[in-house]
């Protein structure tokens, strides 16, 4: 390789290579001695009543920080944890992050803590116990007093990442994210949206979560409405909702922002969604509020046009009362976004638009474009253009 070629490669790599080339062993030792990238931890044991008291004081322990996955354990899995406590089987320690002095976030162990809190609070009955089948069907209040006291004296080990780990707010956030990623490489596997929620904690991610719990959105996708105590406490109905528990609702919202500029689509849907989260990780709270209004405005217009048939395929009666379709929702919302200036005209022609949409869904060729499995840039563009052109044709 000639010197000229080497120089070109160095220029292409830029500062990354230049920085790497001047790092010495002394620099590495100095980094270690100064404690850079070294996490300060403390280990505590909490009795169950102490832990419950911390959970109930939201100023002390945040059970559901935004980067956490949503609660997914069913009553059987929760009951098995309680049985482990009853027979004194050691359970893994929980990990807490000290976000401020004596204020903590749960980084790992959310499902376990929530199961203990829920049982002590008489929120579910024990079921499917193997060693203690006599207790199946009982709430905490139904247990003999001696067993209640036995549960309450169980200790829960906790490893706490102290606030001193980060020298400033930005470094503290990086450490929190780094530790959370490492802790969640095992256990129950995270899906792609849960991973995004973990590693791209930001105002943009918070906005997506807020939209997903807005009444307009939950109504459109038949997800139980937002509850007063969320996310610390959720109903069984909401916990059982698959769109909510898997964060599929958040991915639906994310698709809108990722596909608005279809020219940025590269490498498939997953990569495009990841890129959208990455590119918006520093988007300001003010800009996110504008983006939220844009999304909800598009959704409201779509609702005004399609009514109860919003995002639905044809049912047995030939009306828009079948299952909901995510690809169809992409097409409708993004077509509305493109034609927002003529929203009043679209709404005034809603009956014609609904009938025209039904015709597209009846035709196998156009159905395949609107609802088919194709998720390439070409097929998504065709999908959006088909609904957008339908709108324009009807109101021209």
Image (cartoon, rainbow, N blue to C red):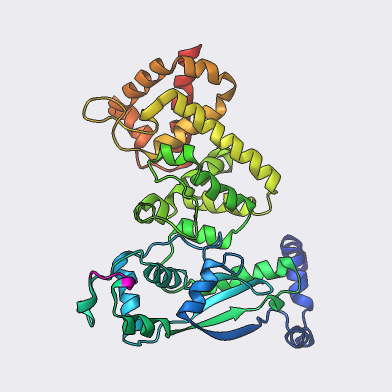
Q: Is residue 326 above or below residue 84?
A: above
- The x, y position of residue 291, in whole percent, is 62, 40
At a point 73% along the width and 84% down the height, the residue shown is: 35
Q: Nearer the viewer, residue 16 or 315?
A: 315
Q: Which residues are magenta?
A: 137-141
Q: Is residue 89 left or right of residue 59?
A: left
The residue lying furthest to the front in this view is 145
| Residue depicted at x 77% and y 70% | 18
- Report if residue 98 lies within the magenta region: no
Question: Can you give x and y, in whole percent of width and height, for residue 195 in the image?
Answer: 50, 61
172 over 384 or under it: above or below: below
On screen, residue 197 above or below 269: below
The mark total stands at 0
**SS assignment for the magenta stretch, majority:** loop
Question: Residue placed at 34% from the left, 55% from the top?
Answer: 240
Q: Position of residue 164 (x, y in %)?
A: 71, 78
């Amino acid at each position: 390789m000639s010197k000229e070629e080497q120089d070109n490669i160095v220029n292409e790599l830029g500062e990354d290579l230049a920085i790497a080339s001047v790092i010495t062993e002394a620099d590495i030792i100095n980094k270690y001695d100064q404690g850079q990238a070294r996490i300060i931890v403390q280990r505590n044991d909490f009795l169950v009543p102490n832990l419950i008291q911390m959970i109930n004081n939201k100023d002390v322990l945040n059970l559901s920080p935004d980067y956490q996955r949503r609660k997914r354990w069913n009553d059987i899995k929760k009951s098995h944890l309680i049985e482990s406590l009853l027979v004194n089987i050691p359970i893994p320690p929980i990990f807490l992050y000290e976000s401020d002095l004596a204020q903590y976030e749960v980084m790992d162990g959310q499902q376990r803590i929530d199961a203990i809190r829920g049982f002590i609070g008489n929120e579910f009955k024990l079921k499917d116990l193997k060693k203690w089948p006599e207790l199946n069907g009982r709430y905490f209040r139904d247990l003999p007093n001696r067993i209640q006291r036995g549960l309450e004296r169980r200790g829960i080990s906790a490893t706490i990442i102290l606030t001193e780990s980060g020298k400033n707010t930005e470094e503290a956030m990086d450490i929190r994210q780094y530790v959370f990623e490492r802790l969640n490489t095992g256990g129950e596997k995270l899906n792609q949206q849960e991973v995004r929620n973990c590693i791209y904690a930001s105002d943009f991610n918070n906005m997506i979560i807020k939209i997903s719990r807005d009444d307009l959105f939950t109504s459109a996708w038949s997800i139980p409405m937002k509850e007063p105590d969320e996310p610390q406490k959720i109903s069984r109905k909401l916990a059982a909702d698959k769109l909510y528990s898997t964060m599929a609702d958040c991915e639906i919202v994310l698709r809108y922002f990722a596909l608005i500029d279809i020219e940025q689509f590269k490498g498939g849907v997953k990569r495009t969604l990841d890129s959208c989260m990455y590119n918006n990780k520093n988007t300001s709270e003010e800009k996110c509020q504008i983006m939220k209004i844009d999304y909800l405005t598009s959704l409201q217009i779509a609702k005004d046009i399609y009514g109860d048939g919003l995002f639905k395929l044809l049912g047995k009666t030939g009306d828009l009362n079948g299952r909901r379709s995510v690809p169809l929702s992409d097409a409708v919302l993004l077509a509305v976004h493109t034609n927002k200036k003529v929203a009043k005209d679209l709404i005034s022609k809603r009956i014609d638009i609904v009938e025209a949409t039904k015709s597209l869904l009846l035709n196998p060729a156009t159905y395949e474009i609107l609802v088919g499995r194709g998720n390439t840039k070409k097929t998504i563009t065709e999908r959006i253009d088909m609904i957008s052109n339908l709108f324009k044709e009807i109101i021209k």
